[in-house]
Each structure stands twice: as C-alpha cells, then as structure tokens.
Amino acid sequence: MTDRCQLRLFFLCYNEPLVLVRENKTWEEALASCRALAADHDAEPDAFRNHRYDLASLLSDSDYAYARTQIQSATTDEVWMGLRFLAGGWLWVNGDGVQHDGLPPHPEARRRCGALAKSGDDSWTIRDCSERRNFLCLQRT
C-alpha cells in the first residue's frame, strides 16, 4: 500500500473507477481536479495523456445507472459530468459523441455544461459552467 492510499480526504468518495468529489467547483475547475487525481506528474506535460481520471463520460445505460447511485451522497443536488457543448455540438470530454435525446441543439451561451441530478426522471441537466457543484471523475481505461 502506498502513502497515498492511506491519506483520507473527507471530500472524496472512492469507488473506483468512478469517484465522487464532494467539493464545489466550476465545470472547468472540476475538469482540472479530475485530471490531477493520480496524474503522472513526471511524464511529459500533455493535457490528455498524463492523467488517469477525467470528468465522467456516461456512455451506456449501465454507466448512467451506476453514476446515479453514486451521486446520492453528493452535497449538491446536481453534480458535474464530462458533458460540454463545444464547436457547435455536445461532446464528452473523452471525445465521444453524445447519444441522448433532449439536449438543446443551440444552448444559451452560459448554459453549456452537463450535470447529473440526484433525483428526477430525466436527470441530465444543462447548467451555467460557472456554477459550483460536486463532480464525478471516471478512471480512464
């Protein structure tokens, strides 16, 4: 066991590969925080390759269902996930396209980040990226 594994952080709920971080951050801050988790800081600085975690991309129904159970202990009603409107379309931070009905094709300028609600039938919601909330990190495979 490494020293890192013995460190207890009250704002992290480790349940790998999905990590709920109970700190309130903007979407951009949440992305940076996920990428800093267990990153290889000795590697060449490359924003995509030297990190083990990213904001969660929920690519399947099972990913979505698992994430919904994990966020029940969040301290905010919604948590950031890795969904963002960029270059005229919705994308996951891992580069995959989004397969979800109901996302606005042209969202308001400030409401371009995806969050997952703890309750409700359609728990995907589009929020202002500068809002502060808990977030989900997913280990990259």
Image: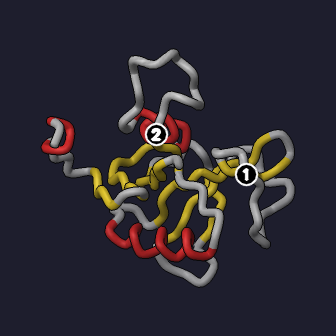
**In the image, 137: left or right of 11?**
right
- Which residue is disc 1 drawn over? 96
Q: Assess disc 1: are there few (<14), some (14-19) or many (≥20) residues with their C-alpha within 10 Å of its C-alpha.
A: few
Residue 67 visible to the viewer: yes
Task: Calculate the distance from the C-alpha at mark 1 to the C-alpha at mark 2.
Answer: 17 Å
Give the colour scheme of this rendering. Answer: secondary structure
Q: Which mark is residue 52?
A: 2
Q: Helix, strand or loop at disc 1? A: loop
Toward which corner of the image does residue 1 lie, by quadrant? top left
| Residue 112 seen | no
* Residue drawn at 39 percent across, 69 percent down: 70
Q: Total marks drawn?
A: 2
Q: Amino acid at mark 2?
A: Arg
Could you tell whether 122 is left or right of 76 in the image?
right
Residue 57: percent from left, percent from top: 60, 56
- Identify the residue at image location x=60%, y=84%: 121
Taking depth in this image into account, of 19 and 88 the one nearest to the observer is: 19
- Which numbered disc covers residue 80? none
Q: Name the residue located 42 percent from the left edge and 75 percent from the top edge.
A: 69
Q: Secondary structure at mark 2?
A: loop
Q: Label 2: how many residues lie within 10 Å, few (<14), some (14-19) or many (20+)?
A: some
Decide if residue 12 is on the left or right side of residue 91.
left
Residue 72 position in % (x across, y down): 37, 72
Residue contact at pointers 1 and 2, CB within 8 angstroms: no
Vertical arrangement, residue 41 with respect to residue 14, above or below: above
Q: Earlier in the sequence, mark 1 or mark 2?
A: 2
In the rendered image, residue 28, in percent from the top left (x then y), is placed at 55, 37
The disc labelled 1 sits on which kind of residue?
Asp
Residue under the point 47% across and 72% down: 66
Q: Nearer the viewer, residue 44 or 32?
A: 44
